[in-house]
Amino acid sequence: MPETNKLKIFNDPIYGFIRIPNALIFDLIGHPFFQRLRRISQMGLSYLVYPGAHHTRFHHALGSMHLMGQAIQVLRFKKVPISDAESDALLLAILMHDIGHGPFSHAMENSIVHGITHEEISLHFMNALNKEFNGQLDLAIDIFKGTHKKKYLNQLISSQLDMDRLDYLKRDSFYTGVAEGNINAERLITMLNVSENSLVVEEKGIYSVEKFLMARRFMYWQVYLHKTGIVAEQLLIKILKRAKEIYPKIKLPASGPLSYFMDRKIDSASFDETGLAQFAQLDDIDILSAIKTWQHHSDFVLSELCKMILHRKFFKIRLKNSAVIETDFQERFKIFKNRYGLTDEETSYFVFKGQIENMAYDEDNEAIIILRGDAKLTDVASASDHLNLKMLSKSVVKYYSCYPKELD
């Protein structure tokens, strides 16, 4: 029987052909843990706002790996020391960086499990795969955790100008049709270099960095934090919260993996091998299937919330730069509570408030460093002559209130 050709290619709508560089990566892509990413939406419920946004974490992981290959090639050309083993490890680490995402990506990050990030779950997955593949992911895990002596290797995976961000901005811009979010990832990668063990951008690439940061700001306010998207995400969170609340009294119909997490509170300390095995079977389909079933449940709160998601009948949302006026909020709360004879807790699922925050550039956390012509290093916010760049490093907070449209 002839040996399977493992040097396959994928046809990606963003970059064209993406080549699988070696047999180990081929086998990891084919593993059920990774194939699950085909069933995890990259942008949660954003497709309810932007109909084209149906791409998955699988797409994103492959795209990030492709950009990492380009970055390795550029840095090696500039005599930055990256061994063959480190090159393979970088490709493995970026490929696996999002493998720990749960259903609908960020939307349910603190709903399925508590107090544990998707990065931590990704590490659990990588450790499990490392055992299965006899330690071949040792170096990749070392780089992913940031414990490798070469700091710049980790920065290619996790920083304010990493391959993850370069791909998701370009990819999400493409699939949403929001052209203002598009960036020139290839130009940015070409400008990368290393100085004093840190990833830097050469001075002539400063305008590309400015464009990248402006595009990121635009995508956050217009796409990731779109007010309708906020409502959809909050609905999803509240559906699972309500389901967990009534589950001890009434065992709701759900898939095995979803029932496992409904029946117990899993946190960082209790997330064990059994939890990982159950999480590995959990995806968007489990949640959508449950919502379709729960819409017919006798519980008014659960039923109504599920119908709202399925039929896209959302709450009214008011987004402001100042805090919600408490008297207006309480008036709507009271009206809805009395109209349907609900408790305060039940009413809080339909009339609620919150806040969102965004900072396009964080000067204090792995700043983007510009390598000037005189070999001096400068933070991009100081090196740039763009008046708005300093403003991008300030945290912007907006406040929202949500309620049924009948209360408007």
Image (spheres, grey):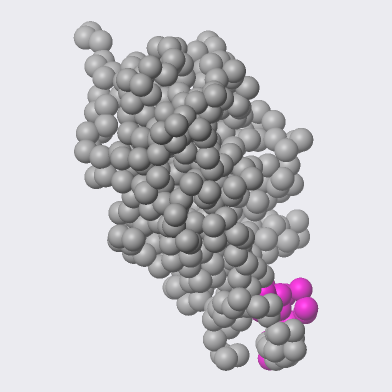
Identify the residue at horizontal 41%, vertical 33% (top origin): 373
Q: Is residue 344 left or right of residue 177?
A: right
Whole-percent x, y for residue 104 in the image: 50, 52
Q: Can the viewer see residue 262 in this picture? A: yes
Q: Is residue 281 left or right of residue 29?
A: right
Q: Give the range drawn in magenta.
A: 339-353
Q: Can the viewer see residue 31 in this picture? A: no
Identify the residue at horizontal 61%, vertical 70% (top origin): 398
Quadrant of the image occupied by residue 247:
bottom right
Residue 345 falls inside the magenta stretch: yes
Q: How many numbered circles does the render carry?
A: 0
Identify the residue at horizontal 73%, vertical 61% (top origin): 245
Q: Is residue 71 left or right of residue 13?
A: right
Q: Is residue 49 left or right of residue 122?
A: left
Does 345 sit above or below residue 28? below
Whole-percent x, y for residue 210 in the image: 41, 51
Residue 34 vs residue 119, the one in the foreground:
119
Residue 62 vs residue 30, the one in the foreground:
62
Does 205 sit above or below residue 232? above
